[in-house]
């Protein structure tokens, strides 16, 4: 009863803060002129959308055993029950070695790049096989940063990189949130209170931070890369409000968190997915998890970091988000044309088909 009361108080405080944030953001427009900046001076990308759909049509659902696979979650991914779980299960069923990265998903890009470096070296050492890295959302930035910062060490061990809905050029959600001092202070306080971290990870997602980082540390041209992005109209999605904000404020298509134009890695092969897909589809479980699975997944961050248990509101919110997403899709009978495991298998096969 005490835990529930504490969670309720935390949620009420968070909702009040969100209302104030929404009010202040209505007066901002800082991302105008920043969205899509990668296209200004970027190396040309190659549109391989047709090739992607051909891979989907051909089948069969299989992966070569000569590679190993590292999955890098996005911001707060290890707090969300079942994140990447369906894909890990599918890869295991296909007989390939796949592992979840050991990053702290609430940490900044540079800190996580060091963790990805260790993961790639460990996985390569354990299997003797080149590593295909799949990064979702911010996880794609962490993986790309590792390849840039530790090029000599891990690029020889890496078969290629796949970024899925990654804000490679930044996201207006982060840029707009941090442009207002009061909103920035609220975000910092919320992250320290509920996630036991600071806002560096969010700061790393602003357009300004991404431009500054990529000027010094672009993805090495020798790394084969496929970048995937999608869009949603927001209806029946937990990303509905943010999708509506991005479209209403900037007229940009997005998956609810990342615009299409900010997700194309310079010099990469680009898949511009045509069907409805929001930011959660590739990684959220397509079913209700057991209580044990919920607890195991939600507590992963605290176990790894040796921190005290999450605030009651934190665990309640993260679990509710995942289950609400599933319930919305079932109730509205709204589903993507493809689910996470099929998407990641197809992207891997596409990368291997295109690359050397």
Image (tube, grey):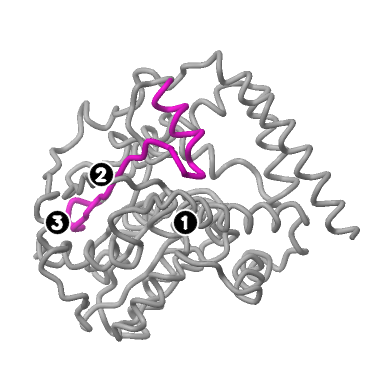
The quadrant of the picture occupied by the N terminus is bottom right
Disc 3 vs disc 2: which is toward the camera?
3
Horizontal and vertical percent position of residue 64:
19, 79
Q: Earlier in the sequence, mark 3 or mark 2?
A: 3
How many marks do you count on the picture?
A: 3
Real-space Cα distance between discs 1 and 2? 33 Å
Question: Which residue is more in the foreground, 279 or 180?
Answer: 279
Badge 3 is on which residue? 53
Q: Secondary structure at mark 3?
A: helix
Q: Secondary structure at mark 2?
A: loop
The quadrant in which residue 57 appears is bottom left
Going 42% across and 34% down the picture, which residue do you hit?
Answer: 171
> Callout 1 environment at 10 Å: few (<14), some (14 to 19), or many (20+)?
some
Going 37% across and 53% down the picture, which residue do you hit?
Answer: 335
Disc 1 vs disc 2: which is toward the camera?
1
Q: Which mark is residue 330?
A: 1
Badge 2 is on which residue? 265
The quadrant of the picture occupied by the C terminus is bottom left
Question: Which residue is more in the foreground, 107 or 312?
Answer: 312
* Residue 89 horizontal side relative to residue 6, left or right: left
């Amino acid at each position: 009863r005490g835990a529930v009361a504490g969670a309720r108080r935390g949620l009420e405080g968070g909702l009040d803060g969100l209302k104030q944030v929404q009010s202040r953001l209505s007066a901002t427009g800082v991302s105008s002129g920043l969205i899509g900046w990668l296209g200004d001076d970027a190396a040309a990308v190659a549109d391989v959308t047709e090739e992607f759909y051909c891979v989907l049509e051909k089948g069969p659902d299989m992966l070569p055993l000569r590679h190993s696979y590292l999955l890098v979650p996005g911001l707060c991914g290890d707090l969300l029950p079942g994140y990447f779980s369906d894909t890990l299960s599918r890869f295991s069923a296909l007989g390939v070695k796949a592992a979840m990265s050991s990053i702290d998903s609430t940490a900044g890009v540079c800190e996580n790049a060091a963790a990805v470096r260790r993961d790639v070296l460990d996985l390569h050492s354990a299997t003797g096989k080149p590593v295909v890295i799949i990064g979702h959302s911010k996880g794609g930035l962490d993986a790309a940063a590792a390849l840039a910062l530790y090029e000599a060490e891990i690029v020889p061990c890496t078969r290629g990189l796949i970024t899925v809905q990654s804000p490679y050029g930044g996201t207006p959600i982060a840029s707009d949130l941090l442009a207002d001092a009061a909103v920035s202070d609220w975000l910092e306080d919320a992250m320290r209170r509920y996630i036991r971290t600071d806002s560096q990870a969010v700061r790393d997602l602003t357009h300004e931070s991404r431009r500054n980082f990529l000027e010094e540390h672009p993805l090495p041209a020798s790394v084969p890369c496929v970048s995937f992005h999608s869009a949603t109209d927001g209806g029946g999605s937990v990303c509905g409000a943010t999708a509506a904000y991005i479209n209403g404020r900037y007229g940009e298509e997005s998956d609810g968190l990342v615009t299409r134009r900010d997700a194309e890695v310079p010099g990469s092969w680009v898949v511009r997915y045509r069907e409805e897909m929001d930011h959660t589809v590739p990684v959220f479980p397509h079913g209700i998890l057991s209580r044990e699975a919920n607890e195991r997944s939600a507590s992963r961050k605290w176990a790894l970091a040796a921190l005290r248990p999450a605030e009651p509101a934190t665990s309640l919110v993260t679990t509710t988000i995942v289950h609400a997403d599933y319930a919305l899709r079932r109730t509205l009978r709204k589903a993507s044309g493809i689910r996470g495991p099929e998407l990641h298998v197809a992207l891997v096969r596409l990368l291997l088909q295109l690359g050397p």
